[in-house]
Amino acid sequence: MTTPSHYQPSLTLAKALSITLFLMILANFSFAQDSSTAEIKSDSLDKLNGYTQVYYFSPGHQARAKSIADFMENAGRFFQQEIGFTPQATLYILAPQHWKSIAAKPLQEVYGFPHNLDRGRLVIAAEDNDFWRSFSPPFDKLPSPMATAVKQAYGKPDGSFSMMPFFDLLALHEMGHSYTGQAGLKMHRHWMGELFVNVMLHTYIAEKEKERLPALEVFPNMVVGSGTAEFKYTSLEDFEKLYQTLGMGARNYGWYQCKLHSAAKDIYNAGGKSVLLKLWKALKEHQEDFTDEQFAIMLGKEVHPSVANVYLNWNK
Ligand SMILES: [Zn+2]
């Protein structure tokens, strides 16, 4: 597949996204142990009361903290209803001055990444920031249907753009890993580990906060729509082999994530919200090892054909 020239501007976005995801995953894999043993000093932070999860925030950011907490709690209520499980998590909603001492090591200089310190602690930025602003699309160069979509998803009233709506949703993706990790699901494949939390995220947004669907969909659409010509690795086999070392490189990893966001959308659109519970149950129940073929057959029979199709039709 070749890269259509009108998609060139989005490649910058793809690059920025892939760096984000690269660092997020790096935090998950390499630095979790490091930070899980260290107690976070939260004395300089304020705390929200009356929520299921624990929310610490930098003084002065109570409104923002409440809005993030409300989003996470609403999603939590939905997931409790749908899958009957709520993990225990602590979220840190931080201003730049607190970010450095709490964020995972490789992210301390990159204010703005939502990421996990371990299975139960998430770090989120309280303020819009240069990193998010660096994602602002080259609006003048986008074809007009895409420009309209981008404006609807990420445009601000003053005419500028912010990727905050997208990053706020990624926080729920990260929270999803706390669900699967704490509930003891066996994900079988790395692609399923990432797909599952994207299915959680997409299902919640589509069911309960439809107005945020553009923020969730437009960015991955742009990246996937730009084609695969410049990516060395595009197969699921390569994804499995290279996932833990990020051997495919940051940009290429970003492309995979966008494909998996797109796959989650297709699954929801094909099977609705009930797929989430079926997939949750199947991954909880099936702790045995599967070959790729056995895994796809189980997913097709016990969950939904659209989930098996992520594997079966990946290259189509
Ligand atoms: Zn993830």
Image (tube, rainbow, N blue to C red):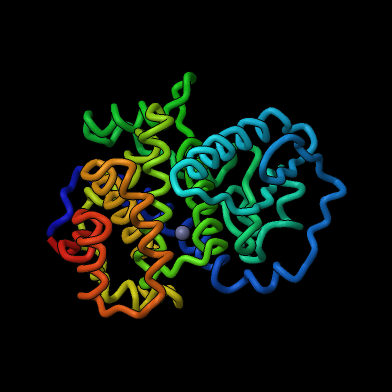
To which quarter of the image does residue 109 belong? Answer: bottom right
Against 192, residue 8 (above or below) is: above
Q: How many marks?
A: 0
* Front-lying residue, 278 or 267: 278
Between residue 218 and residue 296, name the one nearer to us: 296
- Judge from the rendering whether residue 166 lies leftward or rightward of residue 12; answer left or right: right
Does residue 263 lie above or below 46 as drawn? below
Let me know if residue 260 appears in the view: yes
- Split into 4 quadrants, where in the image is the C terminus? bottom left
The picture places residue 159, in percent across and down from the top left corner, at: 44, 22
Q: In the visual, does 57 lie left or right of 207?
A: right
The residue positioned farthest toward the top in the image shown: 157
Residue 23 visible: no
Which residue is at the front of the view, 140 or 67? 67
Residue 313 position within the rendered picture, expressed as x and y whole percent measured from the top left: 15, 62
Q: Residue at x 76, y 36 (%)?
A: 49
| Residue at the spot 63% in from the left edge and 69% down from the top edge | 32
**Quarter residue 288 falls in:** bottom left
